[in-house]
Each structure stands twice: as structure tokens, then as C-alpha cells.
Amino acid sequence: MKMDIEKVARLARLELSDEEMEAFSRQLGKILEYMEQLNWVDTSEVEPTSHTLSVFNVFREDEIRDSFPQEEVLGIAPEEEEGHFRVPRIID
Amino acid sequence: MEIHSLTIHQLHQLLVERKVTSREATESLFRRIREVEGKVKAYLHLTEEEAYAQAEKVDRKILKGEPIGELAGIPIGLKDILCTKGVRTTCASKILENYVPFYDATVVKKLREAHAVFLGKLNMDEFAMGSSTENSGFQITHNPWDLKRVPGGSSGGSAAAVSADECIAALGTDTGGSIRQPASCCGVVGLKPTYGRVSRYGLVAFASSLDQIGPITKDVEDCAILLNAISGYDPFDSTSVNIEVPNYKRFLINDVKGIRMGIPDEYFIEGLHPDVERSVKEAIELFAKWGAEIKQVSLPHTEYAVAIYYIIATAEASSNLARYDGVKYGFRSDRYRDLMEMYTQTRARGFGKEVKRRIILGTYVLSAGYYEAYYRKASQVRTLMRRDFEEVFKEVDVIVAPTSPTPAFGIGEKIEDPLQMYLSDIHTIPVNLAGIPAISVPCGFSNENLPIGLQIMGRPFEEGMLLRVAYTFETNTDFHLKKPNLT
């Protein structure tokens, strides 16, 4: 399976250099080829594992609890303004 | 004996008997660190001031005649993937180079409450992705047994520090072998608990269905002590299990009579280094001599482990690492014209090669049109792998095998061939996929005097059985007493 690396990089919000694209294309091609062997395993009627534990629907009581103070959270932000995380314009 | 070469239980004895203070012990460790760090480079940052403050607090308790716990005043190292309040936590990544958490991971909180002394944060492969610690965004850690070789990974800093006596014990994390393999490479003990045994709150997530925190120590008793301290249900981690934590020290029994040990065919195939095969087979013969029942077993889906893992772990990682976007914390690129570029530039410049490679792979296997073929298929084969273990554990109590197919390899040897690097995890990965516990203990040395590790795997929540088998082995051998010659 040949990967459309440019498309995947865009999905992953990663910018790759031409050199990285070429190297990754080669290396990931080999890795994906290695993974083809899974196609030989008969998995008809086998449930996928998403969790090794049998814990389901872990809820807590709907009670108000303390959260982190706003100053602490904003204190480590790259850019902050009036109690908000400042980012480039999102909507034109 | 130098203080820095002591174990937790030995140092605790001296503290209780007032033969040494925690301050003196902490000073001894920092002296040792200054002496050998130039060669080993295990630490990313040291927290000397805080350590002395913690140590002095314990010394005051002792002087007042207050009873102290086993970890009180003991200098410990923490893998830099565990959030420590007020102390930089980088995951060895440039994207978190300046990240200072405002909260402690639950395991850190527990160790703080036990009055342990924190020496500093230990080097690792970036975001725990790697088997050699060469993927650290900051420095390479060297194996204390041969400085030209890797300490293993991703908890290479932790294992090297324990091996070099740069801390009395350490915490590491294990997603595909990252505690056990470096422990094996560095000649120390490393245990990966059952998934859900230890809270992951405050552990920076790599692959959420596989990650676990665990002890890396000089002997099995220390391993039990740390496991006692970090285990337990945590309401902040919905994957932590509400099962009672036994006193793991009760399992430090020197007796394996009647214990059924499975030796899996698939772990003794081509590619196994002859010295590793020899040491592990000798260990099995010893167990037989001591009364264990040895049985040949089969885990037929072992050959698919690496393929399954690198689909599932990378998929989960691509999701977990999506949060590193420069918005709320960490590195933000200063070169962007719009939001999209802020994301792509921040991530392109902040992440290392291996991390990018895995994010790309993980994104691909989850993307539309490929999810069924890769992720779903891998999850199904994962079920078959878990069933292999369930079947075998009906016949035996533990499974014994090598931890790693080879001793520590050379720095630079595998870094250019990712697939070769991934294949070195073949013995450790199945354990994470099945969620079961496993421990690695030193069991010999190669002809080049490199440590070899023996892996013991057990049923879910039977860490006690692992400790008993490991303790018996250790009590009757002396591999764990050998130290690397660093000075």
C-alpha cells in the first residue's frame, strides 16, 4: 500500500521537508509491507480488543469539584490575553 | 560501602538506626552524579535544592523520633515523562522544552507523601518512542557497562542511573518494553505492572491502552517496595482498577517448588544471541533444580506482535500527540502566517524524526479507507494474542523467556533502520498487548561482559508470583550484585 504522505502529513498537521518525505516514504513503505502479514491471520468472528480490562462506563458523581486556577493554567501559555489563550485568527 | 551503591532497604535501615542522615545520603548521590554524569548522561535536569529540602524534612522527623516509611529520605530518579509540579517535564522533546506542570502525577504525589527525595528527571526516547534513548531531543545516554553502547529505551536514563548508582531507584514507563528492555541492557530489575494496576494520571500519554508506570531497581525487594507505593485505584484515571493492593513484600519468598513455568517456543528462534540463549537456558535449569515444573508451551501469534504493536501504538500516539499544537502550553513556532501554519510549524520544529514517523504511520492506519485494513485488523489479531496467553496460563503459572534477543547494541547501530529497531522489541511487546505484568531480572553476562535479562510474565494482577520467582532467582545467584566499572 503506497501512502500519500503529503495528504497524511496534512491530516496530522505536520510539515515535512522534501528530505523527510523521501526518507519516510521509503522507511514507512518497508514497515507497511512488513505489516501485510496480518492479512494471513484468520480473524473472522474475532472481536477487536480496545481494552485489556473489563471496565465499562466509568462514571463519577455529578458534583462540582475544584478545577485548576485560571492564572496557573494561563501562566504557562505561549500567548495569553485577557484570560484567553491567544491564537491567530480562525474565522475570516 | 558507599551510600550511593545501597538499595532502598539497606539505606532505610541505616536511616532508622541513625547511622546516616537523608541529607548525607542525598549529598552522596549528587557527588556520585557529578562524578559519572559526564560519561553516562542519564539526567535531563537535577533538582538539588528541592532534594535537600525534602531530605532535611525527613531528618527532622527522624530526630523527633517519628516513625518513617520505607521510602522516606530515599533519593529517587523520575523518568521525564511523569508530571512533577513546578519542575520541568519535557518527555525529552523540544516541543515541551519549557513545560512546567502545575500538578503532580498520581505516582509522584504518592512518592511525595511517602517522603521520597527527588534527585531529578531522567532522559528517555522522545515521548517514550524508541528502544535506545537515542531518540531523545536533548542528549544520548550511555550504557554504564560499555559507554559506546545504548542503555536501551525508552527508559534508558532511568535504567542507566540505577545501574550507575546515580539514584537509589527510579520510576520508568513501559508501553512496548520500555522498562524491561533497558533494565535488561543495564543489568538491573524492571517491572511492568498489569495494565490498570498503577494510575496513569499525570503520565504523559503515548499509547493509552498500553502505557504503564513501573519500578526500576537494584534488586527485587526494592521493586516490591516501590510497587507497594505506586499501585492502587485512582479516581483520576478511569482505566485504573479498583482491586486491593497486597503488600508485595509478602511475596519475597525463596521457594519455587511446584510453580509451573512455561517456556514459549516462539521466543527461542533465529536471531537470539547465543549468550542470551545460554544464560536464559541456564536460569531455567536452575529453576528446575529448585523444584519448579518446567513445561514447553506455545504462543502461536507471537510473530505478529511487532506488526500489531506498530499499528495500534502509533495510532493511539497520533491521537494523543495531537494536543501538541502550540496553543495552551509548550513550544509555539514564531514563524507562521495563519493558524494552520502555527500548527504545522510548531509540530514540524518541535517533534523529532521518530515521533513524526510514528505520527504519520498512526494517522495513516486510522484514516478513512484504511482503518478496517490496519487498525481494526490489528486489534483483532491482538485478541488472538491475548487468548494465546489465557490458554497458556491455564497450564502454567508463569512464562519465562529472554527479555531481549540481544545484549545492548552500539550507539548508532540501529538508528538508521527503524524496522530493525522495532524488531528488537519482539520479546517485550506481547506483554503490553495482553495487558499482563512482567519483570526482568539480571541473569548473566555476555562474552563482552554485557548484562543479560531474564523475563518472567504472569497472569493479570499476579505481580506477587513474579516477585516470588524473581526473588528466588536473585537470592540464589549473584548477577545483581555485579556493578559496572565507571571510574
Image (cartoon, coloured by chain):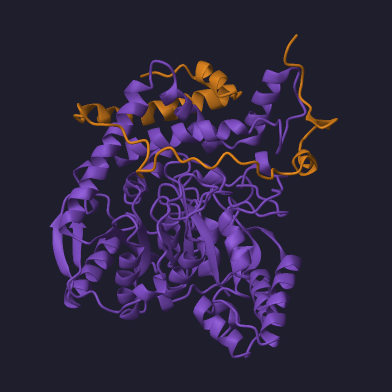
Residue B65, relative to residue B309: is it above or below? below
How far across and how far down the image is residue B377, in percent?
30, 28
Q: Quadrant of residue B247?
A: bottom left
Name which residue lies at 30% across and 66% down: B465
Residue sitting nearer the eye, B315 or B85: B85
Number of numbered discs visible in the structure rendering: 0
Q: Quadrant of residue A62?
A: top right
How far across and how far down the image is residue B410, in percent?
46, 54
Q: Quadrant of residue B285?
A: bottom left
Residue sitting nearer the eye, B210 or B286: B210
Q: Is residue B445 visible?
A: no
Residue sitting nearer the eye, B429 or B243: B243
Residue sitting nearer the eye, A68 or A79: A68
Most extreme residue toward the top is A92
Which shade of the palette goes to chain B? purple
Name which residue lies at 35% across and 76% down: B474
Quarter of the picture containing the N terminus of chain B is bottom right
Residue B470, relative to residue B98: is it above or below? below
Name which residue lies at 78% across and 38% down: A74
Can you tell which chain is drawn orange?
Answer: A
Q: Is residue A55 visible?
A: yes
